[in-house]
Image (cartoon, rainbow, N blue to C red):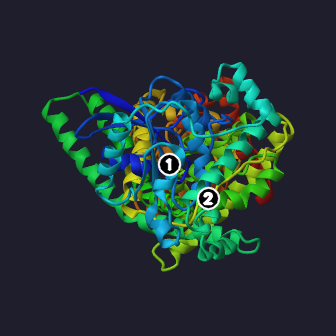
Amino acid sequence: MCERVIALAGNPNVGKSTVFNCLTGMRRHTGNWSGKTVDLASGRFATAQNAYILVDLPGTYSLLAHSAEEEVARDFLGSDSPDGVVIVCDATCLARNLNLVLQVMEIAPTRPTVVCVNLMDEAAAKGIALDLDALSDELGVPVIGMTARRRGEAARLGEALDAAFSAPARTQPPTLRYSEEIEAVIAERGGARWQAMQALSDDSDMADGIVSALLARAEQIADRAVLSDRCRSCGYTAADHRLDRILTGRRTAYPIMLALLFVILWLTVAGANYPSAWLGAASAWVETKLSLLLRAMDAPAWLHGALVEGVWRTLGRVVSVMLPPMLIFFPFFTLLEDAGYLPRIAYNLDRPFHACRACGKQALCMCMGFGCNAVGVVGCRIIDSPRERLLAVLTNSFIPCNGRFPTLIALITVFFVGSGGRWSAPLAALFLLGLILVAVAVTFGVTRLLSSTLLRGVPSAFTLEMPPYRRPQVGRVLVSSIIDRTLFVLGRAAAVAAPAGLVIWIMANVTVGEVSLLGWCADLLDPLGQLMGMDGAILLAFILGLPANEIVLPILLMIYTAGGSLGEIGTWQALGEVLVSHGWDGGTALCVMLFSLFHWPCSTTLLTIRRETKSIPMTILSALLPAAVGVLLCVAVNVILG
């Protein structure tokens, strides 16, 4: 039995990934794409008659390519790779989805095609009735309605695919007439309708004519297939509109955004302590066993130190510090995304970003940066304009990622709010929220500066779908946030932290005279550190923390205690005693927190920027920009505090 390749297409927010998971049993999201370098998710499934390979294309509203997602979908559908197509539509907003259906059917009019009208349960709940037989008659292809989240729906879609392949090939696309001028160009090209449309899409007048014809035909089909006018509000209910008036209102939008961020930070701060302690204890237990094993093997002391005190201790520290906050932060972030709130954030922040001559979609990339700046940089692919995409890439590192939170939380707790009190966690979250607002303000300022100098340009308008509010699928959210985000980011950090631990251990144990390389480098950097309100040991810790921001504070403790292995933070009181004994006060802590907010990105983020921009100068600029801001801010604070 040969395998047939099926392209899975559809608009964003129609449940396409859920259909993909339903058919293939794969519980993961689609991969990312950059330019024309395609990394498409695929999976296999079989019916009684055929075996299929399902390829999940990026969600897109149109194939008249103006973005990377549209180019990927268009190029794949226009190639000979797919044997058939499944187009997923939203039952609550059919007319808008039919625009893409018509384009897909015109790009390959004889290819077996099935239209899957998903979210039938939401349509029924909103009083929307569909005549799927009439829709099938209008399109000339099989049409099925389904709710992909329910079990057993995959079998019906597989049967529809079998029927599409066994039916006689279509010889004509759906009736779709353009203007006489456009039809004349099509005739000149021998009737190759899609190729003619692609050639004409660069002409604004012709493109408007093509879009108008597509939309008009989509409305005609929807008028016959939809038995309720409520679909014209794209599935919105009165409750949706009331929520939007609150969540996107001029007076309420920003306070609600800040309140939600505060709650997530509070839960992250309060909830991460115990798992971090458990993981730290587990790491120490494994370290003990490794030590016993190496001693039993009569391993030399230097090998024990390098592997256990260097590589393993660094790796254990990164995992115990990074994993718990990510396990809390990422699921909450994904729940907001699944409920439909993140597009509202982009809408709310479109005005300030537009004032900075940037794109409102940068708000979504900025939100991703809170979890991991590398993820935020990859997320900049959703921005169509190359200039605005580069603006978002260069400024994403101004947002504190999950790896910087441990240092910030530790210093806030030790020097400003204390520990163990009833209000310590909410006060720490409130202080952290204030630092984040500073980071957001600086992001706007640097974006405006770049868009007025190095990256001049006029901000582009963009169309952003406001999907209906939906109850989040908690199980899918937990799986996707843990596998696709948490473990992915953690694996990348661990990959660079392990060799970094070896380098740090070597520098701590190799001496020049009676001073270790760590101490020697710290002394060399001390004048600049003093100018910034810190010291050379702090600057050296940030430099050596390039592989992972989580290890900055442990490296600093190693330098301060002149130890040959990565230091453990231990209790807040013990940490405070070590720092105060080396001249720290509230001003020092404030400067360190500011520099933690604004310094060069970690190595993972820099490599991601290099891959996304394909430019070494831009990668260097992305490292120098936040570092320059951090140095200037620290010097200013140090001068003000005297």
Q: Where is residue 214 shown, x and y percent of the image?
A: 67, 43
Q: Earlier in the sequence, mark 1 or mark 2?
A: 1
Element type where label 2 sits in the image: helix
Above or below, comparing residue 216 to residue 204 in the picture: below
Q: How busy is the neighbourhood of tag 2: few (under 14 within 10 Å), some, or many (20 plus)?
A: some
Horizontal side of residue 452 vs 520, given as left or right: right
- Can residue 214 be seen here? yes
Q: Which residue is mark 1?
A: 137
In front: label 1 or label 2: 1
Q: Quadrant of the C terminus?
A: bottom right
Q: Where in the figure is residue 101, as x and y percent of width and height?
A: 56, 43
Drawn side of residue 42 relative to residue 194, left or right? left
Task: State the residue position of label 2.
Answer: 223
Of the pair 431 and 558, the residue shown nearer to us: 431
Query: Which label sits on residue 191?
Result: none
**Quadrant of the image occupied by residue 60:** top right
Residue 297 vertical placement versus 427 (above, below) = above
In this picture, residue 407 sits left or right of residue 567:
right
Query: Which kind of residue does numbered mark 2 sit on?
Result: Asp
Can residue 27 be seen by looking at this rendering? no
Q: Amino acid at mark 1?
A: Asp
On screen, residue 372 versus residue 17, left or right, reads right
Residue shown at 43%/38% (left/top)? 492
